Image (cartoon, helix red, strand yellow):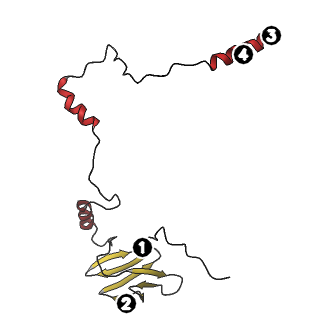
Amino acid sequence: MLVLPLLLVLVGLWMTRPRPMPTDAPRARPAEAPAVPAADEPAAAMAAAPLVLPARDPFQLPAAIAAARAALFPNEPSLTSPSPVRLQGIIWGIQPPRAIINDRIVKIGESIEGAQIVDIAPEGVTIDYQGQRTVVRLPAPSPSSPPAHDSSP
């Protein structure tokens, strides 16, 4: 009966014993590892230097890809607005749907600032401006603006 508590005490002491801390000294290479030739020293220095890439918007397509896509799909509306229209809101749930563009309420078929309204959808307004179809989307709400709340009871 005395053996079990004594065994537990010994195991507890073994588990809580102080262990040596690892040192920061480099470890010796194994004998089978080949030594690095002196000619590779510049490559090793480059590997140690941080890689600096030019700043690029990760959400913007590179110009070459955008041009190839436009050539392959000429009728696809672009996602950027080259026109002077500014979408401020979409009125959905009424027929026909309407959009608020440049402080005016417009519907499909109307023109504003030289842009023809082709389609109004919850995702954005498709316009035809200078022969090019473009989807104009609502700007993302700023994080500092308070959320809109319903004033109805």
Residue drawn 33% across and 85% down? 116
Amino acid type at image mark 3? Leu
**Label 3 crowd (10 A; few <14 / some 14-19 / many >=20):** few
Q: Position of residue 111 (x, y in %)?
A: 34, 89
Which element type, helix, strand or loop, lies under badge 4?
A: helix
Q: Is residue 125 left or right of 61 when viewed as pictured?
A: right
When the figure is inspected, residue 134 is found, relative to residue 37, above or below; the finding is: below
Q: Say which of marks 2 and 4 sits in front.
A: 4
Q: Say which of marks 2 and 3 sits in front.
A: 3
C-alpha separation, residue under disc 2 versus residue under disc 4: 88 Å
Q: Is residue 39 left or right of 91 when viewed as pictured?
A: left
Amino acid type at image mark 4? Val
Amino acid type at image mark 1? Pro
When the figure is inspected, residue 144 is found, relative to residue 153, above or below; the finding is: above
Which element type, helix, strand or loop, lies under badge 2?
A: loop
Q: Position of residue 40 (x, y in %)?
A: 20, 28
Amino acid type at image mark 2? Glu
Of labels 2 and 3, earlier in sequence is 3
Numbered mark located on residue 9 in the image: 4
Of labels 3 and 4, earlier in sequence is 3
Pick whichever, 115 or 45, lies toward us.
45
Pick whichever, 4 or 114, lies toward us.
4
Q: Position of residue 72 (x, y in %)?
A: 26, 65
Q: Which residue is mark 3?
A: 2
Pick whichever, 117 or 47, lies toward us.
47
C-alpha separation, residue under disc 2 versus residue under disc 1: 22 Å
